Amino acid sequence: MLYQLYETQRSLMEPFSDLAQTAAKIYSNPLSMLGQSPFAQRISAGYDLLHRLGKDYEKPEFGIRTVDVDGVSVAIHERVEINKPFCELRRFKRFTDDPATLDTLKGQPAVLIVAPLSGHYATLLRDTVKTMLKDHKVYITDWKTPG
């Protein structure tokens, strides 16, 4: 229910966000009459802030392709292990052709990274995942947004 309310609010605010972006550009342009007013920079900054608050941000990728394990470059394949209506459990599978490194990887423990439900994307934990991949089999929760 809260997700539908959030999406409705975001959809209703989108035109105001676009208008705020336009106003910020008008007040920051030195060739504009409004851009020459004494408080033009502050007004432009305020409109820019309103635009950023209402803007819809795309979900970035984890983008981890390789990781260095004991001096050997190990390929990483990201895949969804479990797909639920509210969450995806992602696994970062490690691959290598080096037999010694492969034996090391097989003996390493698994770790589950639980991303916070704070409204941020799990990809903010990208560096944590990359660090943990050197010594662990890594799984992470990736909470879904309604859509």
Image (cartoon, rainbow, N blue to C red):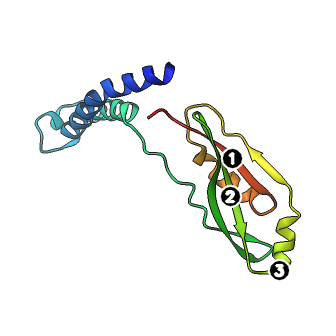
Return the x and y of residue 28 as percentages of the image width and height.
23, 41
Callout 3–callout 1 Cβ contact below 8 Å: no
* Category of crowding for the residue at label 2, using alpha-carbon neighbours closer than 10 angstroms: few (below 14), some (14–19), many (at least 20): many
Q: What residue type is disc 2 on?
A: Phe
First in sequence: mark 3 vs mark 2:
2
Report the side of 53 relative to 73 (left or right).
left
Return the x and y of residue 26 as percentages of the image width and height.
18, 38
* Category of crowding for the residue at label 3, using alpha-carbon neighbours closer than 10 angstroms: few (below 14), some (14–19), many (at least 20): few
Out of 4 and 36, give the one closest to the viewer: 4
Q: Secondary structure at mark 3?
A: helix
Out of 125 and 21, give the one closest to the viewer: 125
* Category of crowding for the residue at label 1, using alpha-carbon neighbours closer than 10 angstroms: few (below 14), some (14–19), many (at least 20): many
Q: From what the image shows, is residue 32 above or below residue 37?
A: below
Q: In the drawing, what numbered circle is on residue 92?
A: 2
Q: What residue type is disc 1 on?
A: Ile
Callout 1–callout 2 Cβ contact below 8 Å: yes
Would you identify the image quadrant in which residue 133 lies?
Answer: bottom right
Return the x and y of residue 12 as percentages of the image width and height.
31, 24
Residue under pointer 3: 99
Residue under the image location 33 percent in, 34 percent down: 51
Q: Secondary structure at mark 2?
A: strand
Report the side of 109 relative to 7 (left or right).
right
Residue under the image location 21 percent in, 33 percent down: 23
Quadrant of image for the C terminus: top left
Residue under pointer 1: 140
Q: Secondary structure at mark 1?
A: strand
